[in-house]
Image (spheres, grey):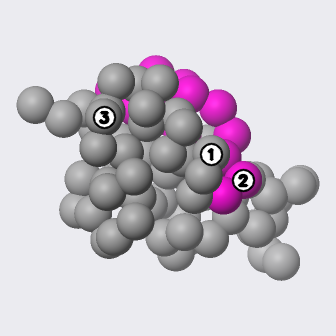
């Protein structure tokens, strides 16, 4: 079973999006490369494939998928 993966709303101050996997905070992703690294650290071996497409497993909240710039800018 794949844990819940959430990419939260981008930061209003400097961009980047908080990433949680299974409710655990993995950090602030500034691009897809960061997101892949966080998913690998969470134990997801197919992280590249999950991020490269529009995976229904990843929940992009408060913004478009694969966009990391500051909110409102």
Residue 48 drawn above or below residue 3: below
| Numbered disc 1: secondary structure | helix
45 lies left or right of 66: left
Quadrant in the rendering for residue 32 = bottom right
Q: Residue 17: in sight, yes or no?
A: no
Q: Which of marks 3 and 1 is in front?
A: 3
Q: Quadrant of the N terminus?
A: top left
Residue ranking furthest to the right: 13
| Numbered disc 2: secondary structure | loop
| Residue underneath mark 3 | 45
Q: What residue is drawn where x is 54% and y is 26%?
A: 25
Quadrant in the rendering for residue 43 = top left
Q: Where is residue 10 in the image (x, y as percent from the top left)?
A: 68, 58
| Residue 48, disc | none
Q: Which of marks 3 and 2 is nearer the N terminus?
A: 2
Q: Which of marks 3 and 1 is nearer the N terminus?
A: 1
Mark 2, Cα crowd under 10 Å, few <14 / some 14-19 / many 20+, is some
Mark 1, Cα crowd under 10 Å, few <14 / some 14-19 / many 20+, is some
How far apart in space, not on screen, are marks 3 and 1 (Cα)? 15 Å
| Residue underneath mark 1 | 34
Circles 1 and 2: CB atoms closer than 8 Å: yes
Query: Camera-side residue: 11 or 28?
Result: 28
Q: What residue is drawn where x is 40% and y is 58%?
A: 51
Circles 3 and 1: CB atoms closer than 8 Å: no
| Residue underneath mark 2 | 30
Q: Does the stretch in magenta take in 29?
A: yes
Q: Secondary structure of the magenta portion, mostly? A: strand
Which span of residues is magenta-colored?
A: 19-31
How far apart in space, not on screen, are marks 1 and 2 (Cα)? 6 Å
């Amino acid at each position: 079973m794949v844990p819940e993966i959430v990419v939260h709303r981008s930061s209003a101050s400097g961009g980047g999006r908080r990433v949680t996997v299974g409710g655990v905070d993995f950090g602030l992703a500034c691009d897809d490369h960061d997101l892949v690294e966080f998913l690998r650290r969470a134990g997801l071996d197919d992280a590249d494939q999950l991020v490269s497409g529009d995976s229904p497993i990843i929940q992009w909240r408060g913004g478009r998928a694969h966009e990391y710039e500051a909110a409102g800018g």
